[in-house]
Image (tube, grey):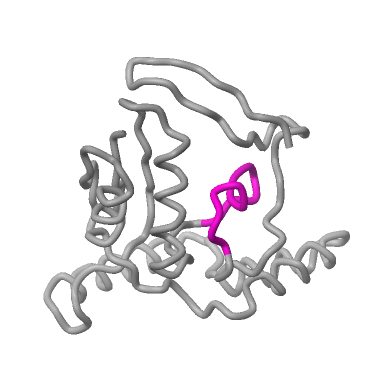
Amino acid sequence: MNAGKWGSGACGDWRQVGDANDSGDGFAVDEDVDSINRVDQLGGEYGTALHWLPSGRLVVLYEALAGLISRGGAFFNADHLSSGAPGSFFHTASAADDSGQQEAAFSGGAADWEGWWGRFRAVDGFAELIAERDRRFRVISGSLGVTPTLHTEALRVAGFTETGTLWQHFNDYVVYGIR
């Protein structure tokens, strides 16, 4: 993999590690998802949602990112995060919103998760890729329940001087850290 692309803007310097449109920059994760603990194991078109990472791996990843992002630079994570204890008002309201959004999508013709993968499995030429995806995700049964608070605190401890929630819709969040 090459060193990536560098740039500068109103929010500070940035580094693009991978680009799905540039065949030389993207790279695959060759470890099980639960074993990822280095920033160079994520990126490009084969990245992962951070909610798949156990909390210890997430902390290590944020520490590595803090070493790569220049002072004044920003990190953003848009993710579906766990929030509220099961049975709490917020958990119940978030689940109802998720169900309503999914029901509306499904009634409009969108495939559910299993249906989407079923359709994709039926496409000629993808059997090897799907088998690799199944291998990588074989030990994961869903989100690991890491909360937005853990994300923002892990960013703070890793060296980000400002952390918080930039946007939220029930249990969908954009959390950020400024170096």
Q: Pick out the residue farthest to the left.
A: 89
Q: Give the total number of marks visible in the rendering.
A: 0
168 relative to 93, above or below: above
* Side of 55 where 132 appears, left or right: right
- Which stretch appears magenta? 36-48
The percent position of residue 65, horizontal first and vertical second, equals 44, 43
168 relative to 132, above or below: above
The percent position of residue 47, horizontal first and vertical second, equals 59, 51
Q: Pick out the residue farthest to the right.
A: 125
The percent position of residue 18, horizontal first and vertical second, equals 63, 36
* Side of 86 where 45 appears, left or right: right
- Does the segment drawn in magenta span residue 98? no
- Does the segment drawn in magenta span residue 39? yes
Q: Residue at x 47, y 75 (%)?
A: 142
* Side of 68 where 89 appears, left or right: left
* Side of 24 where 176 appears, left or right: left
Viewer-closest of 49 and 103: 49
Quarter of the image with the N terminus is top right
Q: Residue at x 28, y 35 (%)?
A: 178
Q: Residue at x 24, y 55 (%)?
A: 153
Q: Residue at x 60, y 23 (%)?
A: 5
The percent position of residue 168, horizontal first and vertical second, equals 23, 50
